[in-house]
Image (cartoon, helix red, strand yellow):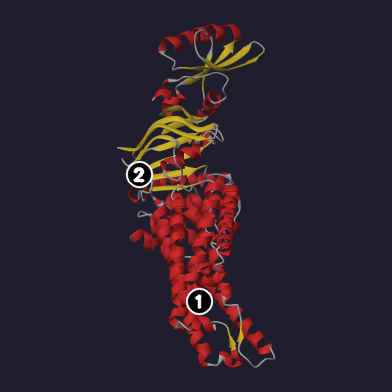
């Protein structure tokens, strides 16, 4: 346990990757979004998608954590299990930090009437139905999901090479197409839409947590036999 | 105490065997030289001992246990590869701080002194360092870790002669104060000859030689003199190399020379020269003959 925490702390030794970079992306997109809100000559509520940017960074972060830090962790005689759990812990800490920023940012946004510009960066209407805490948790979970997806992809690349990764991505795409085909075949689009709407923010968040855990288990099993 | 015990280790990649039935044991507080040509299997062997890679078959015990996913064992080992990758955007200072968190015997004082010795720029990103500076980062981690079992994987790449000498001197000095088991993989054999206590020669995935350095040195001699006299002496002996210039022949023979041999040589007017470790190993790995020395069976 102790060594797992040490791995998590190790990921923060160079604060640039896990702390400053996501914050820089967040602040930059926020400032840009506010400037753009101010430039739009429209009085109604304006919504920007810029808040996605720092969350997508987690995908790259997942890739980097594996392809650069995993080989070094092996030189430091860290077991694969310690590396996996510690790195996930570090990513979770960063995702929670981001979630807090989103919750607080959204609250400020609402209180100031969209930065006085009626422009909304954090608190998208649908999300805000779950309140600042729910929205924060949702953002943190999506960030974790992308982190784990990037991490697993990089692990597959490390273990099975470019061909292995291509095959894996093709299988994922095939699975998506199969799902779409089945839904279309059963003429169930309405039912699926109703199910998604019925889930609400918290339901969707829980579903994504399950997907994240499933991807995490897959990553761990792939990493167990990976060579640095 | 036995630190490492390897039995019949095999690592196969598709149709080639990187390791082909390696058995050896490493003892506590000895400096080993793991010598061999590029692609002989040095790095593969070290990767197996540190559970960074997996054997196809055979057994590896380190400190009496299987090292795979075993924090108790791995915590006592340090192995920085020759082609080690570091976290993106990390500076040497980050790498050393990370290392200090995991090696219980880490000496920051030694690390700081080595940074000064190697003139390593601490503020430059590792990916921007020169080859020699990159090697220095690995050497510093290996030395300052003071791990009970430390591997150095061709640590000299890109280091100039002065820096290499600093490494050898510091290794010996720190080893004297803090004895540990060191495995030094190298093909600059004569440079490390005075440092290593035991020689392990690996070639094409097999252990060719595993013996005390001094015993290996005495294992061959060069006989120089008249063609016919040399031929008479070497008859029935294993000659691993022969050079002739006019009537003068120089032959390198395997096997220790006893008193009778020396008397014979003196009587025939032949001169005896010693063979450097490097020469001997080069001859052994040239495949001009198939040597089955007793060392290979140990």
Q: Position of residue A10 (x, y in %)?
A: 44, 62
Q: Nearer the viewer, residue B250 or B294?
A: B294
In the rendered image, is residue B1 in sight? yes
Q: Nearer the viewer, residue A38 or B203?
A: A38
Q: Nearer the viewer, residue B286 or A122?
A: A122
Using the numbered discs, state the Cα–Cα distance from disc 2 to disc 1 in whole angstroms: 67 Å
Badge 1: chain ID: A
Q: Residue furthest front?
A: A186
Quarter in which the N terminus of chain B is drawn: top left
Badge 2: chain ID: B
In the rendered image, is residue B93 in sight? no
Q: Position of residue B176 (x, y in %)?
A: 37, 44
Comparing labels 2 and 1, the label whose residue is closer to the camera: 1
Q: Position of residue B291 (x, y in %)?
A: 50, 19
Q: Residue at x 46, y 75 (%)?
A: A199
Quarter in which the C terminus of chain B is drawn: top left
Q: Is residue B251 left or right of residue B110?
A: right
Residue A153 badge: none
> Dot 2, crowdedness within 10 Å: few (<14), some or many (≥20)?
some
Q: Position of residue A155 (x, y in %)?
A: 51, 53
> Dot 1, crowdedness within 10 Å: few (<14), some or many (≥20)?
few
Element type at mark 2: loop
Element type at mark 1: helix
Q: Are marks 2 and 1 in contact (CB under 8 Å)?
A: no
Q: Residue at x 60, y 49 (%)?
A: A162
Q: Quadrant of residue B16?
A: top right
Same chain for labels 2 and 1? Say yes or no.
no
Residue underneath mark 1: A197
Residue underneath mark 2: B179
């Amino acid at each position: 346990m102790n060594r797992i925490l040490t791995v998590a702390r190790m990921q923060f030794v160079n604060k640039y990757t896990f702390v400053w970079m996501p914050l820089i992306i967040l602040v930059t997109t926020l400032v840009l979004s506010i400037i753009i809100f101010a430039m739009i000559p429209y009085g109604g509520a304006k919504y920007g998608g810029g808040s996605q940017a720092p969350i997508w960074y987690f995908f790259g972060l997942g890739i980097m954590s594996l392809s650069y830090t995993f080989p070094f962790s092996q030189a430091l005689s860290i077991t694969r299990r310690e590396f996996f759990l510690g790195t996930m812990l570090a990513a979770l800490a960063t995702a929670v930090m981001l979630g807090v920023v989103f919750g607080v940012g959204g609250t400020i946004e609402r209180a100031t009437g969209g930065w006085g510009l009626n422009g909304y960066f954090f608190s998208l209407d649908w999300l805000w139905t779950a309140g600042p805490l729910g929205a924060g948790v949702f953002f943190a979970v999506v960030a974790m999901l992308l982190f784990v997806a990037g991490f697993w992809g990089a692990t597959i690349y490390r273990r099975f090479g470019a061909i292995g990764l291509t095959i894996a991505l093709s299988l994922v795409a095939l699975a998506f197409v199969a799902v779409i085909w089945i839904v279309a075949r059963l003429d169930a689009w309405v039912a699926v839409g109703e199910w998604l709407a019925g889930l609400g923010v918290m339901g969707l968040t829980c579903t994504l947590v399950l997907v994240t855990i499933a991807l995490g288990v897959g990553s761990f099993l792939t990493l167990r036999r990976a060579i640095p | 105490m036995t630190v490492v015990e390897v039995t019949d280790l095999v690592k196969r990649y598709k149709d080639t065997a990187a390791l082909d039935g390696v058995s050896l044991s490493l003892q506590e507080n000895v400096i080993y030289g793991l010598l061999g040509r590029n692609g002989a299997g040095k790095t593969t062997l070290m990767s197996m001992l540190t559970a960074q890679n997996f054997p196809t078959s055979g057994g590896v015990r380190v400190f009496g246990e299987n090292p795979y996913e075993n924090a108790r064992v791995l915590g006592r080992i340090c192995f920085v590869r020759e082609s080690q990758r570091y976290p993106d955007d990390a500076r040497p200072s980050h790498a050393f701080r990370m290392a200090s968190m995991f090696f219980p015997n880490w000496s920051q004082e030694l690390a700081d002194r080595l940074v000064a010795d190697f003139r390593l720029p601490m503020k430059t990103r590792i990916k921007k360092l020169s080859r020699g500076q990159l090697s220095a980062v690995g050497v510093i981690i290996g030395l300052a870790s003071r791990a009970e079992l430390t591997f150095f994987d061709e640590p000299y790449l890109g280091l100039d002669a002065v820096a290499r000498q600093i490494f050898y001197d510091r290794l010996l000095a720190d080893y004297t104060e803090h004895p540990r088991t060191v495995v030094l993989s190298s093909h600059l054999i004569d440079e490390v000859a005075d440092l290593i206590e035991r020689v392990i020669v690996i070639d094409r995935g097999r252990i060719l030689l595993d013996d005390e350095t001094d015993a290996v040195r005495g294992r061959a001699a060069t006989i120089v003199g008249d063609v016919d006299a040399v031929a008479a002496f070497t008859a029935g002996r294993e000659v691993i190399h022969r050079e002739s210039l006019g009537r003068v022949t120089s032959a390198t023979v395997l096997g220790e020379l006893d008193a009778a041999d020396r008397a014979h040589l003196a009587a025939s007017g032949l001169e005896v020269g010693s063979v450097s470790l490097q020469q001997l190993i080069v001859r052994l790995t040239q495949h001009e003959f198939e040597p089955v020395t007793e060392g290979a069976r140990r």
